[in-house]
Amino acid sequence: MEFHWIDLLPQILLTAGGFLIFCVGAFWKARSSQLLFGMAIVTVLAAGIGTILGSKTLQFAGMLEVGGYGRLFTLLFILITLISILFAHRYGRDRSFAGDEFYGLILFAAVGMSLVAGAVHWLIFFLGFEILSLSLYVLIAIRKGDPLSNEAGLKYFIMGAVSSAFLLFGIAVLYAVTGKMNIAESLAVATENIPMMLLSLSLVLVGIGFKISLVPFHLWTPDVYQGAPAPVTAFLTTGSKVALFAALLRFSSCLANESLSYFVPVIWALAVVTMVVGNISALVQTHLKRLLAYSSIAQMGYLLMALLSVKQNGVPAIMFYLIVYAFMDLGAFGTVAILSEGESDLDALEDYRGIGHSHPWQGALLAFCLFSLAGLPPTGGFIGKFALFQATLQARFITIAIIGILTVIVSIYFYLKVIVFLYMHPIEKSIAIRGMAASDRIGLVLIFLLILGLGLVPSPLFSLIARVLPLSF
Amino acid sequence: MENFPILSLIIFIPLIGSFFALAFWRRLNLCRWTSLCFTLADLAAVFLLFAQDFKWRSGPTGRWWLIEDFPWIERFGIRYSLGLDGISLALILLTAFLGVLCVLVSWKQIETRVGAFHFFLLVMQTGILGVFLSTDLFLFYLFWEVQLFPMFFLIGVWGHENRIYATIKFVLFTMTGSLLMLIALIGLYILHGRETGNYTFSVAQLMQTHLSLPAEILLYAAFLFAFAIKVPILPVHTWLPDAHTEAPTAGSVILAGLLLKTGAYALLRFAFPLFPMAAKLSVPLLLVLGLAGLFYAAWIALAQKDLKRLVAYSSIAHMGLVVIGIAIWNAVTLSGATLQMINHGLTTSALFILVGMLDERIHSREIAVLGGLWSRMPVFSAFFLFFAIASMGVPGLNNFVGEILILIGTFKKEPLVAGIGFAGLLFTVVYILWVVQMVLFGEPRKEHVLWDVTPREAVILVPLAIAVLFIGLCPGPILNLLQDSVGSLLDFLK
């Protein structure tokens, strides 16, 4: 089979950059503190340019899809990585973890994400899944002295091990039933052995369900999000979830109609409990990171709801929302990172009193991201949510759309609650927060422009998605 | 002039102004002056519209005097399309006019975070103007939401003691309605698309959809629910007294003068024409609720201790009459209802402004601590009396015209409703006379430091008074403006 190494340019660049950072970190002790940061940024930008320049073929050696869908998501992951690094720069330096392991691993995680989203072969998918997970275990626990961070790392590790086991077993059973390792081919098989097929698919779904924290596999999420350093949480909640959901989306659209029909009630029920539990649990949270964790669970619920329409032209809506979701959650956790001073993160809602006035830029961006998460115009979140509900209704899933919109109403309350703390409560104690570093500013502006842009002129992204999709599955 | 996007200009002048206001946040007076200039420019742009001859033009988005139509999100057939007719012209004129007054009213009252205050004020004006001009249902929904959140901040940041409770209640009520409407709106869009193969949000085309009666009733119910909350129609009015009472004066003016109007406007522009059969079925319900609002609000108003709350309840009563006018749906009542929206916007805003002025002086809105103002602030008291009797519906002043039109039109179709409505108006007279007596007359209180109307305040009150007198004495021009547009609305619902 013919293949071009140039097709793998983004992945190769990211891996090489990661190794180079490790080498510099290990052998050049007298380096400038900015060097690793600069190397990471250059690597990410180079990989981004590599992705945009594009590839000669659609698939690399029948393993990795580099043509359309995978390429679009690779670009998204590179952007997520870039913004996460920007937010982590000062944060990590102040807490002295911005060493080679941080920058190296975040690049490796990006490689893992792009493999997960682009894989057309189960082995590559699992490989990407493991690269991503391993990097994240370390990144979450990167504040070695902090017991919360360590606990979060351990929890994520145990959960990740369980989910890997489910996934691997599911893939093995699927191979046993169909005899194929190509994702599209194996899923499209109309087998007689329905029970085994369903078993394998359920196992895969559970494995992914843990990672994208669908209820009832979500229990780790608030603890890990709270314990991990805020920039890492931002990276985790966007990159890892979007990658896995992109894979789930690929699986669902490749799945034979007959097999999918067995899963429609399952997905329906999972989506309902995820939306309901996520939004209602968020109501009673008193800490912002936990609140955002539950909010991200609920967001996955909306996406899962639209997944029901996967065979009825619902894919573009889901892709659009995944992209918007990445930016708004990145922005929300990123602002937490920027606002955090001292050892632990600024987390208790009480501490956010009056932040909107004392720190107008950070407060405004946080409020803007929350408005977008709540789905209010003129943000990308509004267009995205509109697209999701439109796809769901178009596919005639009316009941779940109404349940969904009712949970959105519930969600408005807790998003508003944060904004009330930001702007409407009098300041009781002043919290010393340093000004923003240049990298923080760039990150803020990028996020703002992306969310606003997607809200006002969503057409280019929709037409890009429409161009990419026929090349993909 | 033909292709100049003047409607967009009118919508976005305040938005541009809002960024300037925010940018000048360090210099308070510059902020105020910038906002004033932009709102004045907006008012001037609306007046510029009158320079054109109003002839009907037909387009894919319906028949309008002025049309703007561009594709926006092709994937969903969403267009940026605006249309102007007499009804929207009257309402945007009111919006631009009250916009100027809101800046003037806040001149002394708002001392903190002035830049942000004007930012939200102007953004909200953009949202409201957009609601009145949109002819694409998606665009309408977008503006509908955009007008909501500035108000959330205006009440929550610059409001009075109980502001957080009031503002959250306001947003949750409104959002509940509008999100259910969003589902209905997408539902209508899909049903229309399935029927015709043409997926569009254009109101003119969606009106052609053939809906089964159950589907029509469900969709209409969602629309009605959203608009009823905004109007507000009994029994979903409970957010209004809280929001009004806690809002700063400019916020109350916009709430009463404009936001409530968007609900009534959407009812007659979208809900009724889109779902004529279901709308017809809902007429008895609307009549009963409108009448109930009239009596209930008047009755509750009498029990109020807070002057601002009293004016707020009077809004519910007035809007009840507007709802009756819309529900009867004939040429006379529709003109009356539209005119009454404007009238209510003028008189109630004036009353809120007067209450705000009192609040600036004595830092209380309790009726009990007032009294005998006539001898200490004669000019202020004269204005108060003037707007109070205008609100009561005294002939020669604006409310009388609107009320009489609604009642006459109703009498032709539903004499009983008209009779009861007339009795309800008598209730209004009772509480207004009561409040006039409590506030203006009686024993003067010595403990307050009072001063009469300042020149700035006169600049606010005099134009309002002129408008009230003008509509009251010669309503002809405005009714002519409305006539054709009302006529074309009537065609939708025979």
Image (tube, coloured by chain):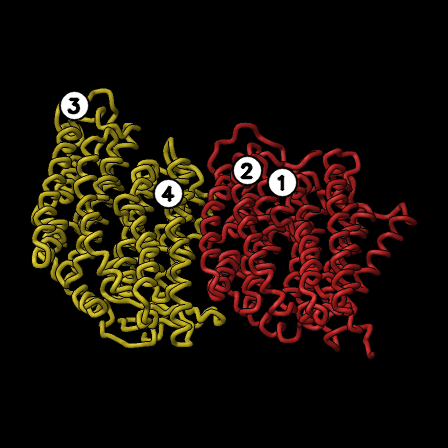
Chain colours: A red, B yellow
Label 1 packing within 10 angstroms: few (<14), some (14-19), many (20+): many
Q: Chain of mark 3?
A: B
Q: Nearer the viewer, residue B8 or A81?
A: A81
Question: Label 4 vs label 2: CA separation?
Answer: 23 Å
Question: Label 3 vs label 2: CA separation?
Answer: 45 Å
The C terminus of chain A is located in which quarter? bottom right
Q: In screen coordinates, is A223 left or right of B204?
A: right
**As drawn, B278 above or below B61:** above
Residue mark closest to the camera, 3 vs 4: 4
Please report the residue visible at 41 percent of the width from the left and 75 percent of the height from the top.
B198
Q: Position of residue B162 (x, y in %)?
A: 38, 32
Label 4 packing within 10 angstroms: few (<14), some (14-19), many (20+): many
The residue beneath circle 3 is: B444
Please report the residue visible at 45 percent of the width from the left and 43 percent of the height from the top.
B27
Answer yes or no: are tags 3 and 4 on the same subunit.
Answer: yes
Asked if the residue at tag 4 contacts the one at tag 3, i.e. Cβ–Cβ closer than 8 Å, the answer is: no
- Give residue A355's mark: 2
* SS at circle 3: loop
Asked if the residue at tag 2 contacts the one at tag 1, i.e. Cβ–Cβ closer than 8 Å, the answer is: yes
The residue beneath circle 1 is: A339
Residue mark closest to the camera, 1 vs 4: 4
Nearest to N terminus: mark 1 or mark 2: 1
Asked if the residue at tag 1 contacts the one at tag 3, i.e. Cβ–Cβ closer than 8 Å, the answer is: no
> Type of residue at label 3?
Pro
Q: In screen coordinates, is A375 left or right of B310?
A: right
Nearest to N terminus: mark 3 or mark 4: 4
Question: Label 3 vs label 4: CA separation?
Answer: 37 Å
The residue beneath circle 4 is: B170
* SS at circle 2: helix
Question: Label 1 vs label 2: CA separation?
Answer: 9 Å
